[in-house]
Image (cartoon, grey):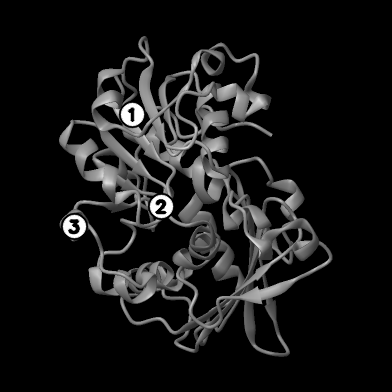
Amino acid sequence: MITYSAPSQKNMSSPVKVAVVGASGYSGRELLRLLLLHPHAEIVAVTSRALAGKPLVSEFPRLRGFPQAEALKFIAPDVAAIKALGATVAFLALPHGVAHEFAGPLLEAGLKVIDLSADFRLRDAKVYAEYYDHAHPAPALLDEAVYALSEWRADEIKNARLIACPGCYPTSVLVPLLPLLKAGLLDESPISVSSMSGVSGAGRKESIPFLFVECNESVRAYSVPKHRHVSEIGQELDLAAGRKVRFTFVTHLIPVNQGICTTIFAGLREGVTIDDVSAAYASAYAGRPFVRLLGKNQCPDTKNITSTNFIDVGWAFDERAGRLILMSTEDNLVKGASGQAVQNFNLVHGFPEETGLMVV
């Protein structure tokens, strides 16, 4: 059984000054939206090499009318400048292989770092090299980084300096699977995972495969059989189960902007029932505001989670095949990235987890 004790709430009279490093991408945009709505955060720096000197609202016109946003201009990503502006927390909304350049210097400057990239999610530098095709650039920081799946590592997160937010696909897989593996409800047969993501998951860049005419009216699998997220999914499943968990993971691109839909097929141990599954979920996620348990034979829908920090979970048992079916949906840019980052920010600072995140 997982227990969680909320940290004591700190003095909220002064907002926490934050910087968003790499603020020009899709996750950066969502992060800015959420932080502007947060009652205890003040954005003091937004960085982008390409957009330095330009007003924030010129790149993101939807933020016009927010006094904070109107006052901000992009600056070059310089640690000394970020520190001088008073930031005590830096969110890194950067691609993998880039975040490490700033994480170490920001930590040395006394800031807490909340990283949305993959640079610090893995515990083993050799596994990182295998899946990301280059040596880990800052292996000394891996032992300090906390893999920050909010619902599972709250106590570690609140005391961490370097917070590695999980990937979007892994969040959609781990939230349904971890309680069942932790409780020993699943047998050792291979687990099959099929996930579908909107095009924003590829990032905000010019790329022919992600043009509208290439993606519209199209569904296709990709990165088979070795998607990069296999590494962090496997790491966390093994830790929860206390053994090596065998699984396959196939991702698909679907013609929507945002949203992930994941379906998982697993075997139950002899004597375990679907009611045991329901009980494990109820125990694991009691009081956790962003995991919505839909119940038996209920299928989640991406339209109900887009632009929110919720993850919806349903489950069923196929008597004919003898297989458990787990289903989840989340927004890849919010619960799968920026929203979970803000949820972790709340944990670090003793704010209620849902602060600034109850938006629909």
Q: Quadrant of residue 83?
A: top left
Residue at 37% across, 9% down: 13
Please tell me which of labels 1 and 3 falls first in the chain: 3
Residue 298 screen position, x and y as percent: 74, 62
- Please report whichever mark, 2 or 3, sits nearer to the chain's N-terminal start: 2
Nearer to us in this view, 272 or 250 = 250
Type of residue at label 3?
A: Asp
Compute the Cα span from label 1 to label 2. 21 Å
Vertically, is 161 above or below 325? above
Viewer-nearest of labels 1 and 2? Answer: 2
Residue under pointer 2: 117
Measured as percent of width and height from the top left, residue 280 is found at: 50, 63
What is the C-alpha distance between the residues marked 2 and 3?
17 Å
Image quadrant holding the C terminus, namely: top right
Contact (Cβ within 8 Å) of mark 2 with mark 3: no
The nearer-to-camera label among 2 and 3 is 2
Residue, disc 1 = 349
> SS at mark 3?
loop
Front residue of 205 and 29: 205
Depicted 199 relative to depicted 8: above or below? below
Q: In x, y percent, where is residue 36?
A: 53, 23
User: Can you say which quadrant of the picture contains the N terminus?
Assistant: bottom left
Mark 3 packing: few (<14 Cα in 10 Å), some, or many (20+)?
few
- Any part of residue 186 in sight: yes
User: What amino acid is labelled 2 in the image?
Assistant: Ser
The residue under label 3 is 143
Give residue 338's position: percent from left, percent from top.
Answer: 50, 42
